[in-house]
Image (cartoon, rainbow, N blue to C red):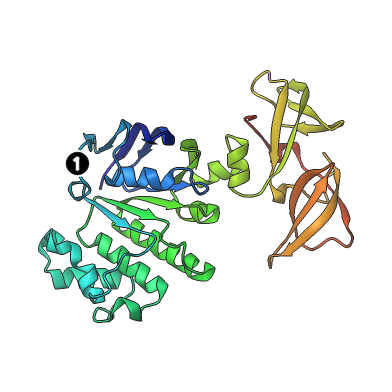
Amino acid sequence: MTDLRLEGVSKAYDETDALEEIDLTVRDGEFFTLVGPSGCGKTTTLRTIAGFEEPTEGSVSFDGRSMGGVPPEGRDVGVVFQSYALFPHMSVAENVGYGLRFRAPPNGQTVEDRVAELLSLVDLEGMGNREPEQLSGGQRQRVALARALAPAPDLLLLDEPMSALDARLRETLRRQIKRIQSDLEITTVYVTHDQAEALAVSDRLAVMRDGRVEQVGRPQEIYREPATRFVAEFVGDNTVLEGEVIANDRNGARIDVDGRAFEVPALSDGSEYATVCVRPGALSRTVDRNRIQVGVETSEFLGETVRIHGRWNGREVTLQLADAPDGDELTVGFDPADAHVVASE
């Protein structure tokens, strides 16, 4: 197992800054996710860890050992790509055992025993003689995972491994990947643009934007206590209220939004303006504080709940109720304790 550290890592292509001063620590045995929109730098970060890219500035180290100048084959990492990258002329077993041509199997195993062990681990027992084209997308992705794990690397890197799969298969496979990672206790860095996926599988995650890290934390922290408006809006839905601070003490604050005063948690600084986020589940028809009248635009039946999108004073409002509203307007409120103040941008 391996500790991973990135210190001041920047990467520039000509005049474009792909990464800017990335500082990250991934703990031994941790499942760590890089999440963010397309073009935010998460895959470039992963490629820099793997050694496919050299940082323009900064350093990457494994267990305190600098990886500067160390090629990918010298870094003891297993990489699973979005495209699977299986060899079509090889059987499943030959694909899984490919890396064992260059490195002996762990614990004195034979190649055949190691391949059989990995196929069992990814639930593909008895499929070693099949060709990749005979497998489903999910099965091919599990072959790619087994191949990456075959040499027993210290670090596993996964680059959007499930983006080409349908929603149900993604959910099944992500549970399998998390189980395997937990069983092997292998340090893992996972890249995805899917916020729900990141929250579901990660021990911790880093939300990235424009080549920088916006926030690092456990899934619960990122969701419940976003540091910035970008994080709040990217990781789940929010109703965002921006306004002038008209009162603030240890018992709470009040902000003026379009002439309407809202009670919110106490502010930790003396800012004149505040940005407050309210998650959909915090807006309720039964709460009698901070009430607003929402014009309903669309509603989505999600099984257990109904997601409603509407507007108040031209501002987007998203809420989640047990059933759909009867008309095109409804009145909801929220408890000040359920609002979260984020850094204004």
Q: Secondary structure at mark 1?
A: loop
The percent coordinates of residue 15 (x first, y second) are 42, 33
Q: Observer-nearest residue: 344 or 182?
A: 344
The percent coordinates of residue 214 (x first, y second) are 51, 36
The percent coordinates of residue 23 (x first, y second) are 39, 33
Residue pictured at 84% horizontal, 32% vertical: 258
Task: State whether residue 84 is above or below residue 191.
Answer: below
| Residue 250, image quadrant | top right
Q: Observer-nearest residue: 47 or 261?
A: 47
Task: State whether residue 9 is above or below residue 176.
Answer: above
Q: Is residue 253 rendered to the left or right of residue 134? A: right
Residue pictured at 35% horizontal, 59% vertical: 81
Mark 1, residues whose alpha carbon is within 10 Å: few (<14), some, or many (≥20)? few
Q: Which residue is mark 1?
A: 70
Q: Is residue 162 rendered to the left or right of residue 146? A: right
Task: State whether residue 274 is above or below residue 328.
Answer: above
Circle count: 1
Badge 1 amino acid: Val
Residue pictured at 75% horizontal, 26% vertical: 253
The percent coordinates of residue 150 (x first, y second) are 22, 62
Q: Observer-nearest residue: 126 or 30?
A: 126
Q: In the current view of this chain or complex, which residue is farthest to the top?
A: 270
- Quadrant for the C terminus, please: top right
Residue pictured at 24% horizontal, 38% vertical: 63
